[in-house]
Amino acid sequence: MNIILAMIPAFLWGTTYSATQFTLDGWPPLLLGVLRAIPAGVLLLLIKPSLPTKTSWKPLLLIGAINIGVFFCCIFVMAQTLPSAISSVGMMGVPVVAMIIHWIVNGVTPSKLKIVCGLGLLVLAWQLFDPSSIPLNGVGLLAMALAMLCLIIGSMLTQKIGKNVHWWTIVTWQLIFGGMVLIPIALIHAAIHTDVYVQAMSTFSWKNMMGIVWISGFNTALGYGLYVWLIQRMSIVDFTFGGIANPVAGISCGIVLLNESYTAEQFLLMMAMIVTSLLPQVIHARQQVKHTLQPR
């Protein structure tokens, strides 16, 4: 099922928060966005060279600005200002937001099962990490809300342009264009806050290099390649339900890399979230099999 494949990029993206805190703590989000996007795009370009057509330059630039430029900045702001588990679990609101936007923009009413499961994920996420009991950063929460919108709107645009442009070209050039959009902004930020950039560069280590290789290579080149391929083969709402792997990765990496600890109850809630996320796809698959087996 595609929902299982959708969990792979979600899991890879869920490692961003802990990996950044562990290997690139204190690095400017704009710089991290550039280092995550452009090397990944160039790598994909070298593996399979492709060029956008005259009519696809502008859409790809727009997708790159939203899906990569703004989204990456938001993700790294979250990584620097919120606990890794909170960043991952908070993104569980994406399926609900996606259903609302899909309903308003495309007039597609979500099934009752998806609505129930979407709300169930929010309830379970709240129980897993009650925001009222954990100090949260307002800037980080704002970045989270904007990241949700970027992911959904960017996915809608990606799905639309994917009807006329090969998926490899889309993922390659949205990464390159997104990184290019960030470069002048990062330069302006570096001119204002020079000390932060100097500190990052002057203390560069193998640990930093490993972090960059992870977030640019596996997390982005592989994760975004699979994401763009999948978004042409399943609905955006269905894809967002695969996001359950995001908090699984965030919590797992938090334990391994940051020595975070969780209770048995929290692990049970996480398992319940996985089941809730998979439920709509499992029931739909069973209905399809049942329909196929019916005598004609």
Image: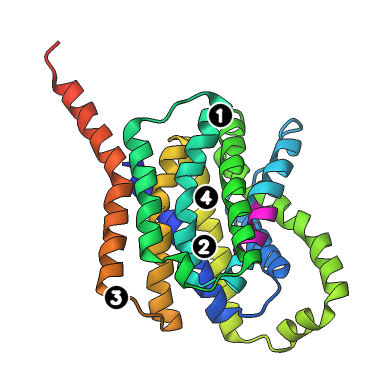
In front here: 282 or 34?
A: 282
| Local secondary structure at mark 2 | helix
Which residue lies most toward the front here? 132
The colour scheme of the drawn protein is rainbow
Q: Relative to residue 230, is residue 69 drawn left or right?
A: right
Return the residue at label 1: 104
Q: Nearer the viewer, mark 2 or mark 3?
A: 3
| Local secondary structure at mark 4 | helix
Circle nearer the N terminus (4, 3) = 4
Distance of label 4 from label 2 (alpha carbons): 10 Å
User: Taking the image as drawn, is residue 229 in sight?
Assistant: no
Work out whether 178 lies above or below 196. above
Distance of label 1 from label 4 (alpha carbons): 28 Å
| Local secondary structure at mark 1 | helix
Return the residue at label 4: 225
Circle nearer the N terminus (2, 1) = 1
Distance of label 2 from label 1 (alpha carbons): 31 Å
Residue 150 colored in magenta in the image: no
Can you give x and y, in whole percent of width and height, for residue 96 in the image?
46, 43
**Is the residue under label 3 in contact with that under label 2 (CB below 8 Å)?**
no
Which amino acid type is marked by label 4? Gly
Can you give x and y, in whole percent of width and height, for residue 244 in the image?
38, 54
Q: Relative to residue 35, is residue 276 drawn left or right?
A: left
Which amino acid type is marked by label 2? Asn
Return the residue at label 2: 219
